[in-house]
Amino acid sequence: MNRVNMFDVNFDNYDFQDLLAFMEDVISQKSHSYILTCNVDHLIKLRKDVEFQQVYADAGAIVADGMPIIWASKMLRKPLKQKVSGSDLFAKLGEAFANRQYKLFFLGSASGIPEQAIKNLKVRFPNLNIVGCYSPSYGFENKEEENAQIIQMLIDTQPDIVFVGVGAPKQEKWIYNHYMHYKVPISIGVGATFDFLSGSVKRAPHLMQKTGFEWFWRLAQEPRRLWKRYLVHDSMFFVMLGLEVVKQFKNEAGRSGNQ
């Protein structure tokens, strides 16, 4: 599979079926890996967060989760196939997970929400094999005893895939720090997915998702929590895109000069 380098990130040029093939490969080999779903917020955080950079350096697969990144790839003439977001995993791959009887574990969100998400998913995919769920306490990532309890839970239930929904970059860092201890084949951060699946948070209409305005919908729903992320931090993306265009131009000029 070819990779696309943008914003100092090596994106795997995957659609959902490619991602499923990657998962199948890791699970069949009984290996241990993790997948990153990179959005604009990740790109902004990566500029200054050295620990997050290390998480990215060791990832098994990195997919583009956000229409702005897809548009940027087209503008830079290295188009990525598809937006592959954690929130769409079950809509796109739920049937495949059920058919293959992959054992799944949900880690994250407030108490009762993963359970409701599971109930709703079972209506759509009755054969889905979900072996457990857990809602961690606030600040759990710094609680040694709770982390040990979660790791033991994963060792006991032996899932093939663990979905971690506690927000970025916390979920990715938690996976990075622990995945070799709990030894689940696939770990993936899925943000607010359990909230969407449970119905506790309404997801943006499909048209807004497709046109890249899902961020606006989320901002309208949770303005106090999200205004700084979307209106201040993420606006830096346009500066980064400008720098990427300049870098691309210089690389192309350099290549043509050497011919």
Image: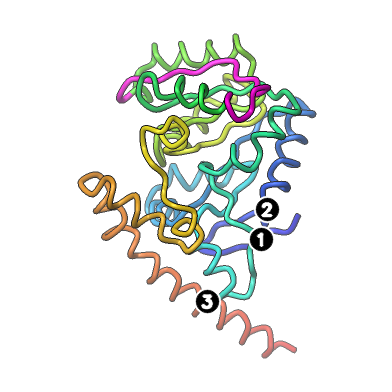
The residue that disc 3 covers is: 247
Mark in the foreground, 3 or 1? 1
Tell which circle, 2 or 1, labels the residue nearer the N-terminal end. Answer: 2
Describe residue 16's horizontal placement relative to residue 46 as left or right: right
Of label 3 and label 1, which has the lower sequence position?
1
**Residue that label 1 marks:** 81
Nearest to viewer (mark 3 / mark 2): 2
Of residue 245 and residue 58, the one placed in the foreground of this image is 245
Residue occupying image coordinates x 77% and y 36%: 25
Q: Position of residue 112 (x, y in %)?
A: 39, 19
Q: Which residues are magenta?
A: 122-139
With 147 as the anchor, is 89 left or right in this view?
Answer: right
97 or 137: nearer the viewer: 97
How far is mark 2 from mark 1, CA to CA?
Answer: 6 Å
* Placement of the C terminus among the 4 image quadrants: bottom right
- Kind of residue sitting beneath label 1: Lys
**Residue carrying label 2:** 14
The crowd level at tag 1 (other Cα within 10 Å; few <14, some 14-19, many 20+) is some
**Is 144 within the magenta?**
no
> CA–CA distance between discs 3 and 1?
22 Å
